[in-house]
Image (tube, rainbow, N blue to C red):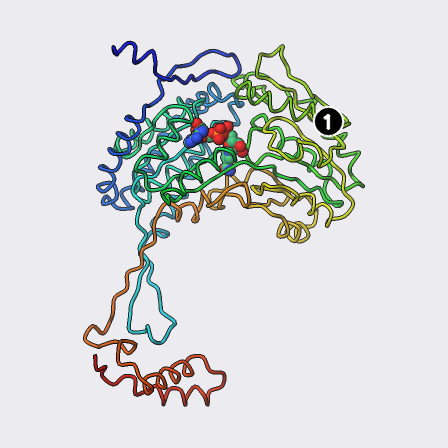
Amino acid sequence: MSTDLQIAAARKVCSVNPATGETLREFACATDVDVCGAVNLAQAAQPAWSRLGVSKRIDILREFQRLLHEKKSEVARLITCEAGKPCVEALLTEVLVALDAARFCIQNAYRILREEPVPHGNLAMKTKSGSIFREPYGVIGIISPWNYPFSIPATESLSALVAGNAVVLKPSEFTSLTALKLASLLHEAGVPQDVFQVIVGDGAVGAALLNAKIDKLVFTGSVPTGKRIAQAAAGRLLPVVLELGGKDPMLVLDDADLEVASSGAVWGAFVNAGQACLSVERCYVHRSLYEAFVEACARKAKQLRVGDGSDSETDIGPLIHERQLHDIDVHVEDAKARGVRVLAGGHRLNDLGSNFYAPTVLADVTHEMVIMREETFGPVLPLMAFDTDDEAIRLANDSEYGLGASVWTRDRARGEAVARRMHAGTVMVNDAVSCFGISEAPHGGVQASGVGRTHGRFGLEEMVRSKYIDSDRLPGMKKVWWYGYGAGFARQMEGFLDLQFARGWGRRVKGALSSAGVLRKRKL
Ligand code: NAD
C-alpha cells in the first residue's frame, strides 16, 4: 500500500470547538505500533528520571508551576475553545487545580516518598530493623476524559512524575490539543520528552495502551469503559486506578439556609454544563422547604446566561457533542412522560448552536425515573421531597454509584453525622463539587464509581510500589525459630507467647522464665 493510501485509511479524531462547530485540528490516531513505541521509549527513559531524585524532580515541577501560572490565560482560553466551558471556569477548575496540585507535590512529595523506618512490635523481631521504600512503578499509562481535559491528566501526571515514573497519556479524542499543551509545558519545564508522552486517538488507542507494557493504568472515564478496562487488566494482573462516573446526591435538611443551598444546588448542577463527575445529579429537599426551594432554583436557573464560553458574560457553555445531548434528551423525556413538573428549561437551545441545552429544573422526580438512576451529565437539576433524615439517607444511598455527595444544614455536627452514613468517596457539608480543588483531599469513589484514589497523599501512594527492606541486627546469631523442634522447644515457645500476650503479670513472668532457654544455640 502506498503511504498516501495508508494515511487515507488511518482513523482520525477531530478537535472541534463545541460552541461554534469549527474544526480546530484533525489528528491521525496513533497506531498500535506508535503506542508500543511510546511505551518502549518511556520504559527506556524512566530509570534515569527515577535516579534524578525527588528533590530535582520537585525543582522541575516548580518550573512547571511557574510556566503554567505565566500562561494561565492562554491555557484557559484553549480549554474553553476545545471543551466549551466558560473561561473563568477553565481558570478556576482547571488551571488553579493544576497549579495547586503542583504545590501539593512540591510541598509534600519528599516527606511522603522518603524511606520510612518501621519499628517492630513483635518481641521475636526486635533484633531486626526495617524500612518501607517507595519505588516508582515504571511506566504509568493515563487515560483521561474530556470534561476536565487539563486538571485531570495534570494532577495524575504530576504525582506519577514526581514519584519517578514515566507517563504515557491517552487523552480524550475530543480534547487532544489541551493534552498536548500540558505536554509542552512539562517539557519546557524540564521533563524529558520520553518521560512524558501524549498519544492521540480514540478508544481503540486507549485499549492499545492498556495492552502495551505499562506497569499501571490510571483511568478516568465512564463506568462502562471502566468495567471493560478492569476486565482486560485482570487478565494480566495490571494494577489500575478507576475514577468513574457518579450520580451525586445533595441532601437539603430542614434547618438548611434555603437561599445559600439553592444557589449551591444551581451551581453544583450546572457548573461545566453539568458535565462534572461530582456535579449535583439528584437533589433531595426536606418537605418543609421543598416548594420554596424548588421555586428558588427555578428562578435562579432562568437567570443563567447560556452561550459561548469565550464570552466573559457566559455562565453555561455548550455540551461537548451530540451524544451528550442525546443522553440528556432521553433522561428528560422519560421524566416528562412520568409526570415531573418542568420549572425551567427541559429543551435544547438550537438558536445558539447544535450543542446547547437550557438549564433545567425538574420537580417531583421519583426513583422510577431514569434521571434518578443513571448519570445524566448535563445541566439538569432533578428535585424530590423527603420527610426524615433517615429517608433522605436511604434515598441517597439507593444508587449503584458512590462518588461524591453533599449535605446542607446550619448544624455542622448534624451534617457530619449524616455524611458518615452516606455511601460515597467524598461528602461535603454545605458545598458541592469543590472538593476536587482540595489537593490534600483523596479523590475517588466507592461501588460503581471506581477503585483507588487520585489527589493528595493517597494519590501519590498510588504511583509507587511499597518495598519493605529488613536487616538483621545480629547476623552472627541463628534465629530462635529455626530448626531444633521438639517438646522442649514447643514449651519454650508457649512460654514466649505467654510472655507477650498472657493476661496478668504473674503468667507473663512465668512465660519469660520458661522461654529463656530458647536463646541457647540452635543445633541446626
Ligand atoms: P469515556 O469512558 O467514554 O472515555 C474516557 C477515556 O477512555 C477516553 O480517553 C476514551 O477515548 C477512552 N476509551 C474509550 N474506550 C476505551 C477502551 N475500550 N479502552 C481504553 N480506553 C478507552 O468517558 P468520557 O465520556 O470521556 O468521560 C465522561 C465520564 O467520565 C463520565 O462518566 C464522568 O462521570 C467520568 N469522569 C469521572 C471522573 C472521576 O474522577 N471519577 C472525572 C471526570 C469524568
Q: Residue at x 40, y 23 (%)?
A: 176
Say left or right for 152 vs 514.
Answer: right
Q: Position of residue 431 (x, y in %)?
A: 61, 40
Q: Tell me the quarter of the image containing the N terminus.
A: top left
Residue 148 appears in the rendering: no
Q: Tell me the quarter of the image containing the C terminus.
A: bottom left
Say left or right for 302 vs 148.
Answer: right
Q: Considering depth in this image, is 191 or 171 the residue closer to the camera?
A: 171
In the figure, 317 relative to 265: above or below? above
In the figure, 237 relative to 303: above or below? below
In the figure, 280 relative to 239: above or below? above
- Mark 1 sits on what residue? 298
Say left or right for 440 vs 238.
Answer: right
- Amino acid on which disc 1 is placed: Ala
Q: Residue at x 41, y 28 (%)?
A: 171
Q: Position of residue 184 (x, y in %)?
A: 32, 26
Q: Position of residue 246 (x, y in %)?
A: 57, 37
Residue 36 appears in the rendering: yes
